[in-house]
Amino acid sequence: MARTCLAVVLAAGDATRMKSSKSKVLHTVGNLPLIAHVTRTAAAAGVSKVALVVGRDAERVTEAASAGVDVPVTPVEQTERKGTGHAVLMAREIIAEGYDDVVVLYGDAPLINADSLLAATAERARGADVVVLGFRAADPTGYGRLVERDGELVAIREHREASDEELAIDFCNGGVITFAGQEAVSLLEAIGNANAKGEYYLTDIVEIARARGLRCVAIEAPEQDMMGCNTRAELAEIEAVWQARARHSAMLSGVTMIDPASTFLSFDTELGPDVMIEPNVWFGPGVRVGAGAVIHAFSHLEGADVGPGAMIGPFARLRPGTELAEKAKVGNFCETKKASVGAGAKINHLSYIGDAVVGAGANIGAGTITCNYDGQNKHVTEIGAGAFIGSNSSLVAPVRIGDGAYVGSGSVITMDVPDDALAIARARQETKPGRAARLREKIAAIKALTNKPRS
Ligand code: UD1
Ligand code: CA
């Protein structure tokens, strides 16, 4: 029978060192709040429920933690910060619902891996009562040390309370502790606060469990997985690790990145096989790119669906609602927004195409602007299949350019153009023979007069 597991996620910290106007766990990595990384990983590891211990920004934190997570997330409030042991006990009633395992996770450590959580529950299934995820710290300063004897964990000693001998241990508590659900409430209630910080340390659970004849073990996870975020500098370090992982898995799935380090991905970026990405490309949330598309350098994409074989950039900006069909092109210094662009259509240079539908094979000349906003409302521009829009045209929406229609360069189009029609909407040219030469003579004469030395 499958085991049931409750995740208790701690997210009540004040996070003063972030110097932020919002809760630390709302800051993002890969454009997803830290807390959402943690709850998604817990869900991926198969937990049945998440108890979310919240303090500051409780509502927004709960919303971010629940979005896109298919297990229930129940917030419980910790009004005072009295330590990790106290924080977990805020979920007492939920723990008492009865789960085989309870796993404690930190909301500010988003790199934790579902496999590590599964390894911990596997140890529980083999009979350990408390399982601690540890890591070998390059610099163990500040971490709780894992004190082991004969393959069992005998204590977690917080840095401030550790003896010199214990301080020499580099195997540290990563903060993820899994323990027997049946014993959980009673173990947590036995935790006191007689220590250097006057806090209820969750880590005391190990010695308390052992005193009751229960078995505790530590298992090792990579140090990177346990990185926590206390400052903006650490946030950037975590982002770097997350990006490196996301890029690596994209490349293994068949994406070419010429300069991976300058490619920024979001948590939900979907890149098809044989996609080619040049340096300095930013993928905001909600981007999907079809097979074989090329994203040239310095492009910025967000909320865009890019069809197979499409070509983007260099220096293109695709904003939300952009849908490009197969082999469409959006070239340099073009911006698109809420624009559906048909197969093989070309928007190659210096254009803004917003609130628009562009038919297959249409050619949008350089500098074409859809005038979609009248100061009050947004209006739609329709451009038919195979239409040709001459350079430097303004299409004043709402307006429709028919299939196969032709718009002369420099036009300001305010009325619909039927299929296959030609529309020219600009002042008629006047040409005056010889006038340029005469103008030049006049200017020269004036110059000669004014430059004459005074007598
Ligand atoms: C904790 C561990 C330490 C471990 C380290 C790993 C304890 C006593 N110590 O230390 O062994 O090596 O994490 O990073 O558990 N929180 C609350 N409410 C509270 C207190 C904390 O929600 O009352 C949250 C914090 O926001 C944070 C997490 O719990 O996300 C950990 O608390 P923190 O004070 O950072 O613990 P450390 O001193 O780092
Ligand atoms: Ca910490």
Image (cartoon, rainbow, N blue to C red):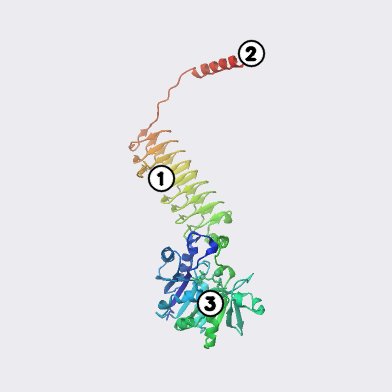
Confirm or deny contact between disc 3 and disc 1 (CB under 8 A): no
Mark 3 vs mark 1: give the one in front. 3
Tell me the amino acid under the disc marked 2.
Answer: Arg
Q: Earlier in the sequence, mark 3 or mark 2?
A: 3
One can see residue 393 in this view? yes
Q: Which mark is residue 454?
A: 2
Q: Which mark is residue 354?
A: 1
Residue 352 spot, x, y in % from top left: 44, 42
Tell me the quadrant of the picture where the C terminus can be found: top right
* Residue behind mark 3: 201
User: Which quadrant, please, contains the N terminus?
Assistant: bottom left
| Callout 1 amino acid | Gly
Near mark 3 (Cα within 10 A), the count class, few <14, some 14-19 or many ≥20, is many
How much space separates mark 3 and mark 2, taking CA atoms? 97 Å
Pointer 2 local density, CA inside 10 Å: few below 14, some 14–19, many at least 20: few
Q: Quadrant of residue 59?
A: bottom left
Ligand 2 falls in quadrant: bottom right
Q: Nearer the viewer, residue 342 or 48?
A: 48
Percent coordinates x, y for residue 157 in the rendering: 59, 78
Provide the secondary structure element on which disc 2 rests. loop
Give the farthest residue toward the top.
Answer: 455
From this view, report whether residue 297 is shown above or below residue 112. Answer: above
